[in-house]
Structure formats: structure tokens, C-alpha cells
Image (cartoon, rainbow, N blue to C red):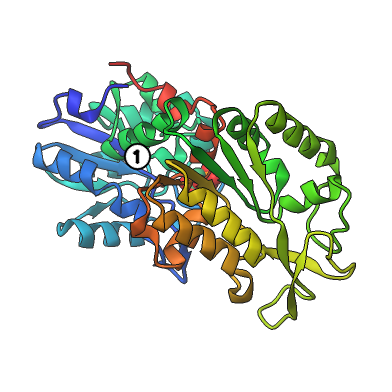
Amino acid sequence: KKSVRDVEVAGKRVFVRVDFNVPLENGAITDDKRIRETLPTINYLVEKGAKVILASHLGRPKGQVVEELRLTPAAERLSELLGKKVLKADEVIGDAVKSQISDMQDGDVLLLENVRFEAGEEKNDPALAKAFAELADLFVNDAFGAAHRAHASTEGIAHFLPAVSGLLMERELDVLGRALQNPERPFTAIVGGSKVKDKIDVINKMIEIADNIIIGGGLSYTFFKAQGHEIGQSLCDDSKLELTKDFIEKAKKLGKQFLLPVDIVVSDDFSASANTKIVDIDGIPADWEGIDIGPKSREIFADVIKNSKLVVWNGPMGVFEIEPFSHGTQAVARACAETSAYTVIGGGDSAAAAEKFGLADKMDHISTGGGASLEFMEGKALPGVVALNDK
Ligand code: 3PG
């Protein structure tokens, strides 16, 4: 795809879609990674003398103005990070926005209001896409995190303007693309998380392309039950029992190493003060629930990670937000941090875990996309990328 580096930007009005969908607590941003990661693109455009018009969604306001979901805190944080004033529009489109843009000087940065305040955004309404396009001369998509959405500001607008990728988008596609197409081996994929149904396609794909597939987290209990183990109160999706058997069968046929936990931490209550104990997978008491992988599993998984050349990790091994249930996820994060393998962390929960354990800067690449990196790893085309101009 064409990149922002391949086109003339000086003096141009550039509509840059970013993903500033950041976590907020009482109006304060608790993790600004997604904002920090867009700085190379924004600085590049500022230095080249473009007029930078930024657009993002925040949360899911469903086509209405929701005061708590205004992008004002993001504009303030961006301004601190850039060391430069960031203009903020109070609306997404309209005459006030147009006049703010016509007052911009080369090198100015303006952030539009939350694009999901407009009902046309998620519907990918061509009228809204056209209205966005009329604000600018060029479209730059740097919102990898929202690239799996075919919305007016991620996909629709690309039909009305020259459309290129930003520097963050380029890096995400490059790193994740290399992992899929030309992986260094042994290649280990770690798939965790709570629900089998969210990870079906990625497990399937990883069985095909990885050498080792490590499974952990809530979704592993469906595998255990299908193998005839008693899982007590653990999470389970009974409609996926056969599917998990097929996965194991397929991995065996392809000669892949398919690893499930051999021991787990069980708990009698879903809270930090619960009683916990470590049991083998055939020792889960009927009224207890599995909430983390046990120490033997941590060791086995860490060993595989250590002996890999490429590791892709998506989804936690347990309920890592609660301290007594966090050790399995922490062990995997630590193994990823310590291995000499190239480590790619899918966004969302695994990225949050790496951050929580203070290991984020030891990973080679932490994606800014949760759903987007998952869909990419499933081998799906991302509409926000497909719509960009080819080189
Ligand atoms: C994300 O956080 O994964 C992206 O910003 C997309 O958000 P969405 O799931 O609300 O479309």
C-alpha cells in the first residue's frame, strides 16, 4: 500500500484517521499508548508543513453526543506529547469545523470531535464519508486499531480522496504480515482468553502456520471437558466441544505441537480473597473453578517460548486483573520478555498484561489493535487497509 512518505503533503490539508479509543477513568486517560504511537506520523506531517486534521472514535456512543466520550482529554494529552498546541473542534463536521480548518496554518494540528457522534460513521454512510473528504486533500489512515471496521472515517472516505497509510499503520502491517507470511521457526503461537468462540479462527490459522500452539485461559476448559475431564464450575462452551477435538486432531495430523495446561489454579470464589489451590487437570473439585494455569504449565510454556524464534501471543492465561490469579499470565509475559525470540503481542488484554507487569518495553512489538490484530492474524482482510491506494 502507498504510504504517507510516497506523497506530497506540504501545504495540504490532510485528514488523518487515528485510533484514540483509549481507556478512561473519571475522564482521565489511564493508558495513552495509542496516542503516543501516532506521534511519528503527526510529527512527520507537521514538519513537512501539512495542515493535520485528526479524527478518531472513542467508545460506542451509537450516533449520539455523549458528553463523557468527547475527545477533549485526548487533545490535551496529544498536545502535551507533541509539545505543541492542538486545536479541538467541538463537532465532527459542519460550518464551525470548516471555518476552523480554513483558519489553519501549515503545521497546525486540529482534532475533530468523536466521529461516532455521527450516526453515519458506523453505517459507513457515503454522505458522511464525502463530507469528511471535503475537509481535506489527502486521507492518511493511521488507525490500525480500527482497520477491521468499514466505517465512514476508516473506509468510506478512501473512495473520495487519495488514500495512504500512516507510519504506525505501516509498521503494524509490516510486523504482523511478516509473522504470517514468512515466520522464523520455531514459531510459537499462544492463544488465551476466556471464550472459545472469539478465538476459533485464530486457533485454526495458528495450527496451520505455527509450529507450537499453546492454549491457556478460560477457553482451555472447553478442551478439557471434551477430553473427558471434570471441570467443576470452570468456564465452558458446550457447543464447541467437538470443535476443540477437531483442533487437536488437526494439529496432530499436521505434526504440530499442541499444548494445553497440565495443572491449574482453582478457586472457590471469583475474588482476591478466595481460597485457591493447585491441582492437576483431572483434580478440579466439582464446586471450584479454574482461574489460572499452574506452576508446571508455566514452566513448560516458558521453555517452549525460550526455544522459539518467533512468538505471537494473544489472550491471557487467567484472570490476571486479580493478583492471586495473575501468576500464569505474568509467567508467560516474563518468558516473552526474556526469550531471544521476536515477540509480537496482540493488543487488548495481553498488551494490558504486559504493561501491568512492567514488561511492555521488553517486547519487540505490541500491537495497538485488539480486534484488528486478531482479525489480521486470522488471515482476514481489513477494510481500512483494503481501501488504501496501492503503490
Ligand atoms: C478497539 O478498541 O479495538 C478499536 O478502537 C475498535 O473499537 P470498536 O470495537 O468499538 O469498534
Q: Nearer the viewer, residue 14 or 255?
A: 255
Q: Is residue 137 left or right of residue 341?
A: left
User: How many numbered marks appear?
Assistant: 1
Tag 1: amino acid: Gly
Circle 1 sits on which residue?
Answer: 94
- Res. 67 in view: no
> Looking at the image, which residue is at 80% across and 75% down?
268
Q: Tell me which residue sits at (48%, 28%) in the image.
A: 382
Where residue 16 appears, as percent x and y from the top left, is 29, 37
Q: Quadrant of residue 36?
A: bottom left
Neighbor class of circle 1 (other Cα within 10 Å; few <14, some 14-19, many 20+) is: few
Residue 253 shows in the view: yes
* Quadrant in which the N terminus is drawn: top left
Label 1 lies in ligand 1 vicinity (Cβ under 8 Å): no
Q: Is residue 79 above or below residue 111?
A: below
In which image quadrant can residue 104 be found?
Answer: top left
Q: Quadrant of the C terminus?
A: top left
